[in-house]
Amino acid sequence: MAEAHQAVGFQFTVRPDGVDFKLSQEVIKNIYLSGVTAWKKKAIQFKRCGYFESFICFYVVIDKGGVLHFLSRDSLLSYHGWIFESHGKMSTSTKVWLCLVKMFSGRRPLLYSFQASLPRLPVPSVDDTIHRYLESVRPLLDNEQYNKMELLASDFKENKAAQLQRCLILKSWWATNYVSDWWEEYIYLRGRSPIMVNSNFYIMDLLYVTPTHRQAARAGNVVHAMLQYRRKLERGELAPLRALGTVPMCSTQMERMFNTTRIPGIETDFVQHLTDRKHLVVFHKGRFFQVWLYTGGRHLLPSELETQFQRILNDTSEPQPGELKLAALTAGYRYIQTKNTLKKQVISLDAIESAAFFLTLDDEPQGYDPAKTNSLDSYAKSLLHGKCYDRWFDKSFTLISYPNGKMGVNVEHSWADAPIVGHMWEYILATDCFHLGYTEEGHCKGDVNKNLPHPTRLQWQIPNECQNVIETSYLSAKQIADDVDFHGYLFAEFGKGLIKKCRTSPDAFIQLALQLAQFRDQHVFCLTYESSMTRMFRDGRTETVRSCTSEAVAFVRAMEDAGATNAQRLALFRKAAEKHQNMYRLAMTGSGIDRHLFCLYIVSKYLGVDSPFLTKVLSEPWKLSTSQTPQQQLNLVDINKFPKYVCGGGGFGPVADDGYGVSYIIVGENLITFHISSKFSSPDTDSYRFGQHIQKAMLDIQALFKPENDKTAQNAKYVHLENGKKHI
């Protein structure tokens, strides 16, 4: 979600000195280590889950001529032709392929059953990548600027690209994924700026339903559901992640969901993942408590967890000196020097960093309330940054519990992307509401065990100089948080159902609406980032879809041209939507632009090769960063039968100082939620204003699909958005 901020703002800090031979040794060494890491992962997975790369797994198939062929499962899953076919028009070859995939998937495959058979992410050709790149920037540059960019690209392709490309191909042969380890290290872990707002993202609770208004009870059920999920995850008992319910996707990111912390370092952080952790750390009113999650060899029951959390809520002790804002260290600039001064607190600090996850029992109610203006905005900002000292931003995720029973999650981004956490969150909400449940009084079901040992206060002796650093970190984090201009609203005029009747992709529809809204807001077009996934490949993460295309620009200009007819606009819309869909498909199947260029840039730095073209590409600002949060990955709840049990989605902070971050979630057939962020300090942006532009753009595009004599769209009264005007 928030990766675009790091993608344009990272600094390459590993550039070895010396002659070319030594530089070449350095890149070969790095590629070698990438492969070693990948093979270590395989060994660990085999030890834990009992699967490993199978070189002899194959199937016999017969072609039309009656010739026998050996088809490995790897090659079977390498077929991506289905994704380029029109919806509802599946070819015979794709039907046969789907039958083979289903046939050899087994009746009840485990989470990691397909992991060893997923194909490797292919390295695109330099010619294709540069061609697509130049095509993507053409609508954003004038003729002189574009000609200069063409010259830079041509010089790079002729003089430097071949050497860099060979290194990437070598890495793709040796490592399981030529992008992911460098992406994690250089985009996330080497960043020295605050991860609060700039990198971490959030996910909301159910919009319309609060199962219980008792804070301790809700936390008890949710934590218990998380422990159930963790156990299934560790045993590989969850169903494999699949596209279309059939095509396997990579599950590697899920391995580090629990027992994981981002540990600060001098030049780079690292992700510490431990085996089964048996405790949780809870923050409440400036105090840290350790809560054991097991008793007698089993998980604590929801009622037992409720008892423990209620004991913490009832505790009236005061924070120790320096304890109140200690977590602000994780909100500000990376804090390795300060952490070194806390070595005497190794037991307490280790308790936090080794915990299964971090829980905050907040003391201010939040949540969406239609009767309260700005309630969604306040809720989102609380999840995104809170008070800047009441979330441990370095934990894989911080679970946040509010006094009115609402919940939410703040997620550290380096270890995984939003769909992975969304998968877990869907399981939690469904288990909480439909399996565990509550008593009539709102308590967790089950007997209350009052003999459990009380939660333990973590002890701190924080030196004065460290307290000063904590305060400095807090003030810098607060400045960032106060600058976040957030607006969230629920678009209920229509949803996926109507868009599909228009015979177009819902994602393309929304992306073109965002382009129209952006132009109306800023009066110029800008480089636009949409996150796509590459998890059909082993260890895949994301790729960028550059949504501001020449076709999209032509459509937007027609919408703003009073002389254009609706028929002309609709034709341009369909052309732009098809272009967007094709780009999305290319990104998903390993033929994107930005990850390839990013890795070429990394190799160039290792080799000491200066490339004005790559430097220019990697420094381009993404003034509009967008992401769709997936919904109904598990299909545990029928939202047609239970329309109130829908999640509000999630969002992230502003990517550029003078740009917008937009996350959207398509909820069922009739609702789309938008999460918009920008900065108050920018005189050019206003999140509420941009939300109005999005709403009008959505309705204006919808009107194109109506008969000309239907004046409904022209006379429609826009629903009142739930935010006030921008205040600085």
Image (cartoon, helix red, strand yellow):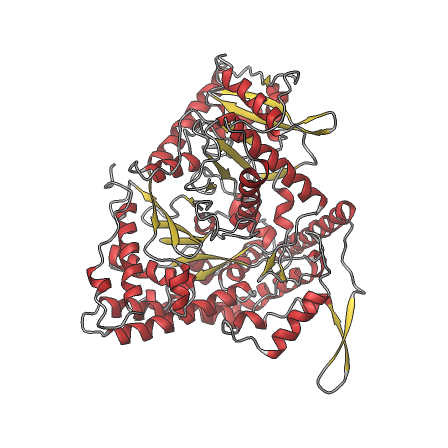
Query: At which x and y percent is residue 606?
Result: 58, 54
Which of the 4 quarters of the picture holds residue 452? top right
In the picture as drawn, the residue positioned furthest to the bottom comes out as: 65
In this rendering, is residue 121 above or below 370? below
Which of the 4 quarters of the picture holds residue 133? bottom left
Residue drawn 68% across the image and 36% down it: 274
Residue drawn 63% across the image and 37% down it: 272
In this rendering, is residue 24 above or below 589? above
- In the figure, is residue 280 to the left or right of 192? right
Q: How many marks?
A: 0
In the picture as drawn, the residue positioned furthest to the right comes out as: 56
Query: At which x and y percent is residue 151?
Result: 41, 70
Which of the 4 quarters of the picture holds residue 305? top right
Residue drawn 51% across the image and 48% down it: 418
Query: At which x and y percent is residue 84?
Result: 52, 72
Query: At which x and y percent is residue 379?
Result: 39, 36
In this rendering, is residue 441 above or below 702? above
Q: Nearer the viewer, residue 396 or 3?
A: 396
Q: Nearer the viewer, residue 536 or 307?
A: 307
Tell me, yes or no, if residue 64 can be seen here.
yes
Q: Nearer the viewer, residue 408 or 468?
A: 408
Tell me, yes or no, if residue 261 can be seen here.
no
